[in-house]
C-alpha cells in the first residue's frame, strides 16, 4: 500500500472537471431478500478520493477495518478510523468514508435489517434501537482494541461468512444476536438514558434534513481541499449562500462554525496518518494544512485531547 502523500494546489482544484452544482444526499436501498435480509461484502476497499455525495442506507451497516486508515464523515461528525476498528452506521445518519491521503483501506461490511432478519426467528432474543447508535452522543467508529468482545463477534461473523458451512443462515442470525446484544450492553439504553436530548439526536441524524442537503457542496469542498486555505466565502459561494447565511446554517447543522470544522477535518486526517504511517509529525502537519508545528500541536490537543506524539506512541 502506497503511503505517499499527495499535494493539491488551488490551481489544480480549479482545473478539475466541474462538480455538480448541488452534490446530493443519496439514499441507497439495498433491496435485501425478505427471507434472509443480510448482505456481506468481505473484501471491500475505499481509496483517498473524495466522495461526491453523502449517502444513507435503509439498513444497519457494520464494518470492520482489515487494513488502512482514514476519516469517516457521519452527519456533522468527523471521526478517524484505523486498522481493527469497527463502524456502526444506522439508517438514521448520512455518511461517507475517505482513506488517508495516498492510501487505500480494505474493509469487511455487513448490511442487515435487525427486525426483518431476527424478528420471527429470534423473538425477544436481542435489543436494538437505532437511536442508540446515532447522533452527537455516539461515536460511530469503535476502537477494536478497546472493545475485544465486539471485535470477537464481528470476526466470528466474518469467519462464518467466509466458510458458509451447513446451517449458515441460522449461524449468522445467532451471531447477529450476539453482536447486537454486546453493542447494547456497551452503548445502549443501559449506558445512557433516553431523554429529550436523545430524541433531538435522532431528529438531527435524520437523512432528510434540509440544512445538510444545502451544505453538501461545502462538505464536498472540505473533503477535497481541507489541506489548503479555505475561506468561508468560498464555501458559502459553493452553497449559493451569503457568508452570513452560510455561517448560520452551517453552525446550526454541524454544531460548530465552518472554520472549526475545517480544522477538525485536518486534525482527523492527521490522526489517521499518525496511525497508519511512519511519516514525520512535522511532515504530516504540513501536508494536512497546518502552517507550523506549533499550530498543529495546539489544534490536535484541542480536538483529540493529547499531543500528536502521544497519539503515535499509543497506536
Image (cartoon, grey):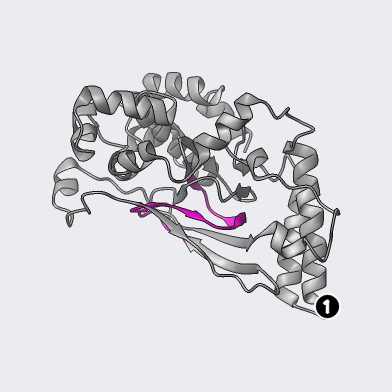
Q: Residue at x 53, y 23 (%)?
A: 307
Q: Specify whether 137 is left or right of 125.
A: left
Question: Residue beneath label 1, please?
Answer: 167
Q: Residue furthest bottom?
A: 166
What span is colored magenta in the figure? Answer: 46-72
Q: Position of residue 103 (x, y in %)?
A: 43, 54
Let me know if residue 196 appears in the view.
yes
Crowd around label 1: few <14 · some 14–19 · many ≥20 (10 Å):
few
Q: Residue at x 69, y 46 (%)?
A: 144
Q: Specify whether 238 is left or right of 59.
A: left
Q: Residue at x 13, y 52 (%)?
A: 15
Up/down of 162 relative to 205, above or below: below
Q: Specify whether 306 is left or right of 130.
A: left
**Relative depth, front residue between 78 and 94:** 94
Q: Residue at x 44, y 39 (%)?
A: 269
Q: In the figure, residue 291 lies in which quadrant? A: top left
Amino acid at each position: 500500500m502506497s503511503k505517499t502523500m499527495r499535494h493539491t494546489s488551488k490551481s489544480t482544484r480549479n482545473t478539475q472537471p466541474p462538480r455538480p452544482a448541488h452534490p446530493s444526499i443519496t439514499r441507497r436501498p439495498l433491496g435485501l431478500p425478505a427471507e434472509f435480509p443480510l448482505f456481506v461484502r468481505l473484501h471491500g476497499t475505499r481509496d483517498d478520493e473524495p466522495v461526491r455525495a453523502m449517502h444513507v442506507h435503509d439498513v444497519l451497516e457494520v464494518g470492520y477495518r482489515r487494513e488502512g486508515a482514514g476519516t469517516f464523515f457521519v452527519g456533522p461528525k468527523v471521526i478517524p478510523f484505523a486498522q481493527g476498528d469497527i463502524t456502526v452506521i444506522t439508517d438514521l445518519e448520512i455518511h461517507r468514508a475517505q482513506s488517508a491521503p495516498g492510501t487505500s483501506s480494505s474493509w469487511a461490511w455487513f448490511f442487515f435489517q435487525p427486525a426483518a432478519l431476527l424478528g420471527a426467528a429470534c423473538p425477544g432474543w436481542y435489543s436494538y434501537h437505532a437511536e442508540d447508535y446515532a447522533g452527537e452522543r455516539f461515536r460511530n467508529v469503535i476502537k477494536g482494541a478497546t472493545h475485544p468482545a465486539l471485535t470477537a463477534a464481528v470476526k466470528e461473523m466474518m469467519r462464518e461468512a467466509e466458510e458458509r458451512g451447513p446451517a449458515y443462515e441460522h449461524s449468522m442470525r445467532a451471531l447477529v444476536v450476539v453482536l447486537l446484544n454486546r453493542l447494547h450492553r456497551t452503548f445502549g439504553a443501559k449506558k445512557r438514558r433516553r431523554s429529550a436530548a436523545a430524541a433531538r439526536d435522532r431528529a438531527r441524524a435524520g437523512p432528510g434534513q434540509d440544512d445538510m442537503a444545502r451544505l453538501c457542496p461545502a462538505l464536498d469542498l472540505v473533503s477535497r481541499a481541507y489541506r489548503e486555505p479555505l475561506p468561508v466565502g468560498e464555501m458559502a459561494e459553493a452553497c449559493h449562500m451569503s457568508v452570513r447565511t452560510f455561517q448560520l446554517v452551517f453552525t446550526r447543522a454541524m454544531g460548530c462554525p465552518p472554520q472549526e470544522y475545517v480544522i477538525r477535518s485536518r486534525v482527523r486526517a492527521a490522526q489517521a496518518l499518525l496511525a497508519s504511517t511512519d511519516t514525520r509529525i512535522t511532515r504530516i502537519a504540513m501536508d494536512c494544512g497546518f502552517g507550523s508545528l506549533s499550530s498543529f500541536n495546539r489544534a490536535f490537543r484541542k480536538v483529540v485531547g493529547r499531543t500528536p506524539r502521544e497519539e503515535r506512541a499509543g497506536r
